Image (cartoon, helix red, strand yellow):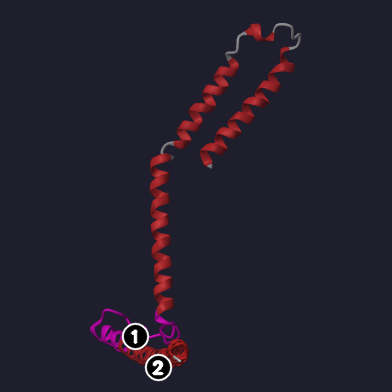
Amino acid sequence: MKQRIAGLQAQISQFDQTLADSKAVLRNFQDNIRLRKERASLTAIDNEIDQLDEDSARKAYRKFETEYNEQRRRQSELQAEVGLLPSPVYNPTLMSLPLIQQAKLGGEIETLKKDHEDKQEELNSEYKDIDEKYRRELINVKVSFLSLPHRMFRGITDRNLFAPQTAEMSNQDLEKLQKALDG
């Protein structure tokens, strides 16, 4: 009987352990279900906030654009009154350009001006006196061709046959030099 009681007590404790494990698994499932519901709720709230932000941003932009255009018109009128401008220059078409587009175009213009200044500076520094350098090189090539020793023409009975080929080669070299200097 004691053995049977001990066996039953062991079974009861095993059942208690199984029951505790089952409750832990059940709590885990419930926690996961609650977590999924909370995540879905959070996503819905985030979407609602984003929508509200977009709506308020659109309203604020429209209000700013309206006020900006009105102030620009007033500024033009005041400048015309003071005599800074001959007449009001309010142009609804120009003023209707979005501010972002105006800023973008202004930035592009500034970039192009800076590029132009850089290229002009490069032209003034690296290619300074390039025409004079080209002329000197052309003269050097022609002089060196004309001063070729006569012994280079030994074995050639007609010197005029050789000269056009050399002249053509020197002209090609001059063209390459000119392209390098221009490029």
Residue 6 horizontal/vertical position (percent): 43, 88
- On the question of residue 165 being in view, the answer is yes
N-terminal-most mark, 2 or 1: 2
Q: Please give the count of numbered marks on the rendered protein.
A: 2
Type of amino acid at the residue the image marks with label 1:
Pro
Q: Residue furthest front?
A: 1
Identify the residue under disc 2: 52
Horizontal side, residue 29 vs residue 74: left or right: right
Q: Is residue 21 above or below residue 150?
A: below
* SS type, badge 2: helix
* Quadrant of residue 17 within the rendered picture: bottom left
* Quadrant of residue 141 within the rendered picture: top right
**Mark linked to residue 39:** none
Give whichever of 24, 11 is nearer the camera.
Answer: 11
The residue located at (42%, 55%) in the rendering is 116
Q: CA distance from mark 2 to mark 1?
A: 39 Å
The residue located at (36%, 83%) in the rendering is 89
- How crowded pointer 1 is (Cα within 10 Å; few <14, some 14-19, many 20+) is rated as some
Residue 108 is one of the magenta-drawn residues: no
Residue 98 is one of the magenta-drawn residues: yes
Give whichever of 101, 163 is nearer the camera.
Answer: 101
Identify the residue under disc 1: 88
**Marks 2 and 1: which is nearer the front?**
2
Q: Is residue 1 above or below residue 138?
A: below
Type of amino acid at the residue the image marks with label 2:
Leu
